[in-house]
């Protein structure tokens, strides 16, 4: 059985892990169906189920997704939600829209889904069964010619095929309606130049010899970044070139990176966050004021940095991470995603579903501290 890999933090919970690892779902007593062949089940409480990522558009439409293939859409900025039609019941982990209509979702079992109507209906573009066979076919010719990198990739692809479609894709990002990248467990990296109709692997172009998991993607000021486990941070210095490792002072896992221009913030385990103001050449540790794992983050249009944590905290900084305000909910629950919700604040997704939160609630616990080490 393929080891269970969460998005991107292991503490999502045993229940989600079991759903991801099991090659079936129960539809009736003693009857089991593969979640890749089972449409997501309609539920009146879909918007209150465990959700892991979201995206909103300027027009007020929002889409969120999560466990067992649940996708929900709102046309009023997050006030009301309707469940979408999804052809699989696998856990969906990440979402990217190129515009208000065209979007992609990835998740467990190597699934890639596509929507052309803003998230109301989804179709399958790829899954782990198709992907494993394609990887073997892709790397075989070069491996037979003696290419050592291709031989290593082929051996891994054959293991992937033999294990079954268990390897998850953990993040996806499209820069336009044709060009996108998806990354996942064990150095799994794919790119498309035709809107997801075909995908090509490029794991051999990553400086990741230990095949660390790839947790998060960012495209900042024309540069691609990949954040991963055990301090892995990769940057594609030139378009089409290799992804080279970037040195940082923290060896723990990174679960996201956000930035604008040459200013970057990368964040991850135990409340650790680092800031660079020179495009990644040097880094300074930020004092976030929390020891909880930072699971997602964003820069608002006004430049405010917002991070969310596994203990339910929301961290808000108006000065690039020099100081943070910690917003602690009255009933804490894990948060897994945050996106800009316009004038009403931010849209949060987590263990209790999706909700809108103002950034200045009337009663909060706030901490502010200067940028010092946080280990």
Image (spheres, helix red, strand yellow):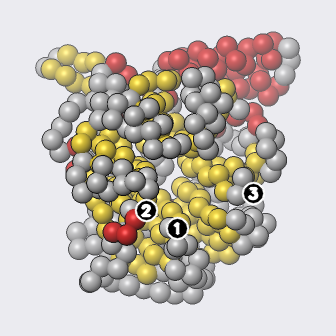
Residue 270 appears anywhere in the view: no
- Taking the spot 66% from the left edge, 26% from the top edge, the residue there is 200
Residue 8, horizontal then vertical, whole percent: 48, 49
Dot 1, how many residues are within 10 Å of its Cα: few (below 14), some (14-19), or many (20+)? few
What numbered label is drawn on residue 340?
2
Q: Is residue 226 left or right of residue 292?
A: right
- Camera-nearest residue between 265 and 255: 265
Q: Quadrant of residue 77?
A: bottom left
Furthest-front residue in this view: 59
The location of residue 357, given as percent across then percent down, is 31, 68
Q: Earlier in the sequence, mark 2 or mark 1?
A: 1
At numbered mark 3, what does the secondary structure look like: helix, strand or loop?
Answer: loop
Q: Would residue 197 be visible to someone looking at this image?
A: yes
- For marks 3 and 2, the one nearer the N-term is 3
Contact, mark 2 vs mark 1 (Cβ under 8 Å) = yes
What is the crowding at mark 3: few (fewer than 14 residues within 10 Å), some, or many (at least 20)? some
Which residue, given by chain and number where applicable, does mark 3 sit on?
246
Q: Is residue 251 above or below residue 209?
A: below
Residue at which label 1 appears: 301
Left or right, 227 with reference to 94: right
Q: Is residue 142 above or below residue 14?
A: above
**In this picture, residue 138 sits left or right of residue 299:** right
10 Å neighbourhood of mark 2: few (<14), some, or many (≥20)?
many
Q: Residue at x 72, y 52 (%)?
A: 223
Q: CA distance from mark 3 to mark 1?
A: 27 Å
Query: Mark 3 or mark 1, which has the lower sequence index?
Result: 3
Whether residue 354 sits left or right of residue 163 in the image: it is: left
Q: Nearer the viewer, mark 3 or mark 1?
A: 1
């Amino acid at each position: 059985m393929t080891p269970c890999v969460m998005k991107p933090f292991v503490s999502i919970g045993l229940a989600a892990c079991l759903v991801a690892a099991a090659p079936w779902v129960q539809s009736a007593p003693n009857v089991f169906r593969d979640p890749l062949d089972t449409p997501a089940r309609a539920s009146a409480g879909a918007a209150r189920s465990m959700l892991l990522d979201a995206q909103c558009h300027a027009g007020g439409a929002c889409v969120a997704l999560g466990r067992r293939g649940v996708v929900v859409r709102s046309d009023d900025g997050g006030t009301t939600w309707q469940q979408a039609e999804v052809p699989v019941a696998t856990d969906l982990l990440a979402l990217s829209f190129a515009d208000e209509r065209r979007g992609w979702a990835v998740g467990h079992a190597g699934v890639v889904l596509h929507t052309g109507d803003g998230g109301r209906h989804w179709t399958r573009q790829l899954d782990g069964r198709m992907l494993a066979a394609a990887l073997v076919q892709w790397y075989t010719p070069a491996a037979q010619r003696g290419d050592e990198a291709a031989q290593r990739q082929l051996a891994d692809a054959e293991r992937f095929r033999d294990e079954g479609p268990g390897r998850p894709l953990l993040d996806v990002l499209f820069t336009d309606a044709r060009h996108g990248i998806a990354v996942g467990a064990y150095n799994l990296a794919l790119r498309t130049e035709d809107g997801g109709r075909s995908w090509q692997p490029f794991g051999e172009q990553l400086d990741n010899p230990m095949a660390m998991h790839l947790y998060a993607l960012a495209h900042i000021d024309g540069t691609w970044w990949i954040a991963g486990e055990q301090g892995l941070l990769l940057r594609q210095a030139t378009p089409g070139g290799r992804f080279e490792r970037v040195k940082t002072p923290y060896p723990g896992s990174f679960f996201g990176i956000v930035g604008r221009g040459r200013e970057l913030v990368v964040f991850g385990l135990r409340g650790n966050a680092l800031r660079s103001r020179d495009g990644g050449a040097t880094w300074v540790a930020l004092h976030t004021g929390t020891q909880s794992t930072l699971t997602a983050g964003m820069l608002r249009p006004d430049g405010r940095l917002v991070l969310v944590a596994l203990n339910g905290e929301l961290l808000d900084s108006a000065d690039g991470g020099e100081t943070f305000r910690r917003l602690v909910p009255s009933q804490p629950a894990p948060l897994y995603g945050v996106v800009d919700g316009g004038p009403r604040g931010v849209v949060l997704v987590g263990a209790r579903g999706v909700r809108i939160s103002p950034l200045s609630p009337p009663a909060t616990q706030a901490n502010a501290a200067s940028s010092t080490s946080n280990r």
